[in-house]
Amino acid sequence: MKMTVFPSIGVALGIAFSVFFAQEAISAEKAQRLCLVNSPSEVTACRRGDSLYYQQQGLVHGKYLLDFAAQYCDTNYEINIQFPYVLCVYSGIKEKINAQEVRKKEIESNTRTALRKVCNQLDKPESGWKQISSDDERRVLITAQGTGPIIQDGDEVTIRVRYPGKDGKPEKFEELKTFLATKGSFEFQGIRQGSSLIIASNGEKKIFEFVDILVVTNPKP
């Protein structure tokens, strides 16, 4: 007896086999890997997205595990730390930056930009800038006069300092400083509590600070 395979059945079988092999290929691509690491130097063998299991013999402090997780674990996923093990999703090796150094360089860059903007005004008497030191080319501009006590030698002074943003204006970042006024505090002599000023120095140590005089007190002997 002669058997006949109808075309529609052949096509259906072909589609079925195609779907089966496609699913197998997709499953193979999505197969997870567990990368076992016994030291940070071994993570180069892992691929980004791998499950990362870290155990290093001889660890005596959990800080090493936290350092490892911060450097190599993807923080978008759960990180499981149970001394002396770490289980997480491998992120790849992250670039390390020192936020304080980045911040310092940003302030220095903004300071240079702000100084360039006001440099042509510093030597003009009508601009209001007052030179207080020729050694570091330091000048002061009073932007608001306060009504509180006048700063004198020996007073304790608390100020708020802000640094230039990218547009040369004071940014939200601020720093509080407290000091004793002395004869060396040229920029603050005779200024009242509540005053605001800008201190600019174009010398070796470039300075551009927005300063508010918050508190002036005379400590009792």
Image (spheres, rainbow, N blue to C red):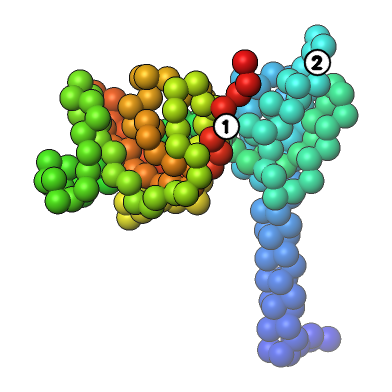
Instruction: From the viewer's side, name the closer residue of 146 and 60.
Output: 146
Q: Residues within 10 Å of mark 1 (few under 14, many from 20)?
A: some
Q: Is residue 32 left or right of residue 135?
A: right
Left or right position of 108 against 121: right
Q: Disc 2 on helix, strand or loop?
A: loop
Amino acid type, residue under disc 1 in the picture:
Thr
| Mark number displayed over residue 61 | 2
Read off the residue under disc 1: 217
What type is the residue that disc 2 sits on? Answer: His
Image quarter of the N terminus = bottom right
* Disc on res. 200: none
Image coordinates of residue 66 in percent, x first then y, are 74, 28
Rendered location of residue 6, percent (x, y): 73, 90
Q: Residue at x 80, y 15 (%)?
A: 61
Mark 2 vs mark 1, CA separation in Å: 48 Å
Picture layout, residue 58 above or below residue 81 = above
Position of residue 41 in the picture relative to residue 167 (left or right):
right
Q: Nearer the viewer, residue 190 or 127?
A: 190
Q: Residue at x 75, y 86 (%)?
A: 9
- Compared with 3, 42 (above or below) is above
Secondary structure state at the residue bearing disc 1: strand
**Which residue shows up at 87% across the image and 24% down it?**
83
